[in-house]
Image (cartoon, rainbow, N blue to C red):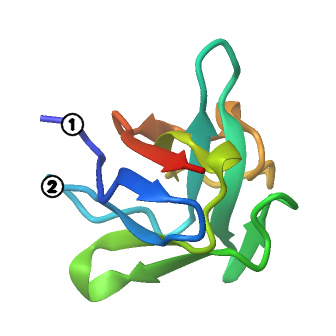
Amino acid sequence: QALLVESGGGRVQAGGSLRLSCTAPLRTLSAHAMGWFRQTPGKEREFIASAFGGATYYADSVKDRFTISRVHANNSVYLQVNNLKPEDSGVYYCAERRSYGGNWYGQASWYDYWGRGTQVTVSS
């Protein structure tokens, strides 16, 4: 069973919204850092958002449209995505940093564990 499981992706029209979810079926999610990344064919995973050190961080391209949040009671991390654009399409991955040290929340290599992703497709 996967360590992280994403859900909530789908196909929406431009301007629409989705709520992506990430949970860990087998254990408690890290208190250190969680992140969301996006990947499109032929490209590297792109930083979208992170909840780290009590703060949240966003890529410029999604700032004011996306919101990352944690609900400890649900052992889940969410990414609310609003006002979607066709360029937001891709596979969205949840990432977890369990070990302490560093603050490279925008780099995929900094994270320890990944889910298998959930597809988001935005049509114009």
Tell me the crowding category of disc 2: few under 14, some 14 to 19, or many 20 or more residues within 10 angstroms, Cα based: some
Q: In the image, which disc is placed on residue 27?
A: none
**Residue at the limit of the structure toward the top, as seen here:** 42
Amino acid type for the residue under numbered disc 1: Ala
Tell me the crowding category of disc 1: few under 14, some 14 to 19, or many 20 or more residues within 10 angstroms, Cα based: few
Q: Nearer the viewer, residue 109 or 120?
A: 120
Image spot of residue 20 (x, y percent): 39, 63
Within the image, what quadrant is residue 82 found in? bottom right
Within the image, what quadrant is residue 12 found in? bottom left
Tell me if 111 is positioned left or right of 114 in this view: right
The first of marks 1 and 2 along the sequence is 1
Marks 1 and 2, how far apart in space? 8 Å
Tell me if 120 is positioned left or right of 32 in this view: left
Q: Secondary structure at mark 1?
A: loop
* Label 1 close to label 2 by CB (< 8 Å): yes
Which residue is painted at 63% across and 55% down in the image?
100
| Residue wearing tag 2 | 25
Q: How many numbered callouts?
A: 2
Tell me if 83 is positioned left or right of 27 in this view: right
Q: Nearer the viewer, residue 56 or 15?
A: 15
Q: Is residue 10 above or below residue 42?
A: below
Q: Is residue 25 above or below residue 91?
A: below
Q: Secondary structure at mark 2?
A: loop
Q: Nearer the viewer, residue 53 or 11?
A: 11
Q: In the image, which disc is placed on residue 2?
A: 1
Which residue is painted at 65% across and 12% down in the image?
42
Image spot of residue 96 (x, y percent): 49, 50
The N terminus sits in image quarter: top left
